Amino acid sequence: MGMRRPVVAGNWKMHGSRASNEVLLGELGERVKPEWQVGVAVFPPYVYLADAVRMLEEADIDVGAQDVCVHPVGAFTGQVAASMLKDVGCRYVIVGHSERRRLYHDDDTLVARKFGAVLSVGLTPVLCLGETLEEHEAERTEAVVARQLDAVTAMNGVKSLGAALIAYEPVWAIGTGRTATPEQAQAVHAYVRHRIHRQDAKISAEVRILYGGSVKASNAAELFSMPDVDGGLVGGASLSADEFLQIIAAAAVRN
């Protein structure tokens, strides 16, 4: 694996406050070590992005947004454009998170357009793929992640994945306390990589595929030891400095 520098990303979802963010980011900024050779990123709610960028100026930690509007500018009340995210100092943007797909009906086409919007301003999309419990139990995992991935490559080209991260998040393992076994995660990551390989071997070897289903300090090392798991998209555990740092350290060990 050597060549793929792992990434550990903390998706805060709708959590945080100025006071708690300052404490959390202050601690992360002091304790994340560049020599770990792990890409670290936090994804606060929109209103805290500029604050987070400012607080992390001296730190080896990037900031990302949890979503984006497909339009570059215009009469879209309540929406935020990719250019604005770049303007305040973001590096990453999550597209297609299962909560966006499920609660806000972001379909495959919209996710592919958001992916393109992020790329168009030179930011890095974090493309989330994953199946629901129902799909999982019907053994449709591969069909679902293939459909979600193909929508993005059909619209943006397979080469676009070279400027992206992918996150596999089994929806049935998010916030449920259930985690895919490391072997289950590895099987899906390998499948995604193989599907990309059929179109572009170089991109498939380079693209980082993160695991995103209830990653915790207690299971991170085992998940990250899998050959095709290149880090994690962490939810709740990223709101605790200690827990998040342990997860980052688990990614560092495998280099």
Image (tube, helix red, strand yellow):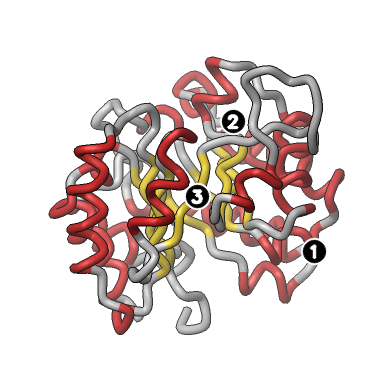
x and y, in percent, of residue 3 in the image: 52, 82
How far is mark 1 from mark 3, CA to CA? 22 Å
Depth check, front residue: 37 or 175 = 37
Q: Does residue 173 appear anywhere in the picture?
A: yes
In primary-sequence order, the first of circles 1 and 3 is: 3
Please tell me whether residue 32 is drawn above or below residue 72 in the rendered image: below
In primary-sequence order, the first of circles 2 and 3 is: 3
Which circle, 2 or 1, is nearer the viewer?
1
The disc label shown at residue 64, or none = 3
Q: Where, by quadrant of the figure, is residue 254 drawn?
A: bottom left
In which quadrant is the C terminus drawn? bottom left
The disc label shown at residue 200, or none = none
Identify the residue at image location x=71%, y=70%.
203
**Within 10 angstroms of label 1, few (less than 14), some, or many (20 or more) residues?**
some
**Horizontal side of residue 145 vs 157, given as left or right:** left
x and y, in percent, of residue 127 in the image: 61, 46
- Which residue type does callout 2 highlight? Arg
Q: Which residue is mark 2?
A: 140
**Horizontal side of residue 9 vs 4, given as left or right:** left
- Which residue type does callout 1 highlight? Lys
x and y, in percent, of residue 69 in the image: 70, 32
Identify the residue at image location x=86%, y=45%.
154
Q: Which residue is mark 1?
A: 159
Please tell me whether residue 25 is drawn above or below residue 155 in the rendered image: below
Secondary structure of the residue carrying numbered label 1: helix
Is label 2 in contact with label 3 (beta carbons under 8 Å)?
no
Q: Does residue 184 appear anywhere in the picture?
A: no
Q: Where, by quadrant of the figure, is residue 13 drawn?
A: top left
x and y, in percent, of residue 104 in the image: 59, 16
